[in-house]
Amino acid sequence: MNWDDLQYVLAVSRGSTLSNAAQTLGVTHTTVGRRLRAMEESLGTRLFDRTPDGFAVTP
């Protein structure tokens, strides 16, 4: 895990959607999704619940 990974997680938690996070970070929503999935896989847990309205931090 590195600082960039944490920036992606923070952007998703603040923006609720991959598109909002991508706009904040200046990357594509695909990049945000890939980085988020990779981080979840490396940690062995889901960081966000996927909802119809976007992403919500897991309890």
Image: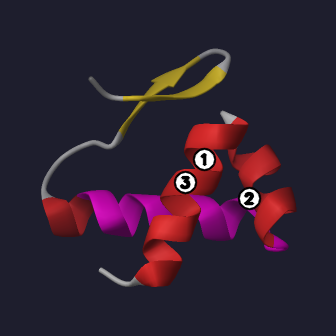
Q: Secondary structure at mark 1?
A: helix
Q: What is the magenta segment's predominant secondary structure?
A: helix
What residue does disc 2 label? Answer: 29
Q: Work out whether residue 13 can be spotted.
A: yes
Residues packed near mark 3 inside 10 Å, few (<14), some (14 to 19) or many (20 plus): some
What x and y, as percent, mark residue 27?
A: 79, 73
Residue 32 horizontal side relative to residue 41, left or right: right
Residues packed near mark 1 inside 10 Å, few (<14), some (14 to 19) or many (20 plus): many
- Label 3 vs label 1: CA separation? 5 Å
Numbered badge on residue 10: 3
Residues packed near mark 2 inside 10 Å, few (<14), some (14 to 19) or many (20 plus): some
Who's the residue at 27% across and 42% down the image? Answer: 46
Q: Is residue 19 above or below residue 59?
A: below
Q: Nearer the viewer, mark 2 or mark 1?
A: 1
Who's the residue at 80% across and 46% down the image? Answer: 20
Q: Secondary structure at mark 2?
A: helix
Q: Is residue 42 above or below residue 59?
A: below
Task: Please state which amino acid type lies under the numbered disc 2.
Answer: His
Q: Work out whether residue 34 can be spotted.
A: no
Mark 3 and mark 1 residues within 8 Å of each other at the beta carbon:
yes
What x and y, as percent, mark residue 58?
A: 32, 28
What x and y, as percent, mark residue 38?
A: 36, 69
Task: Please state which amino acid type lies under the numbered disc 3.
Answer: Leu
What residue does disc 1 label? Answer: 12
- Label 2 vs label 1: CA separation? 10 Å
Where are the magenta residues, as a range? 26-40
Residue 43 horizontal side relative to residue 16, left or right: left
What x and y, as percent, mark residue 19?
A: 79, 48
Q: Nearer the viewer, mark 3 or mark 1?
A: 3
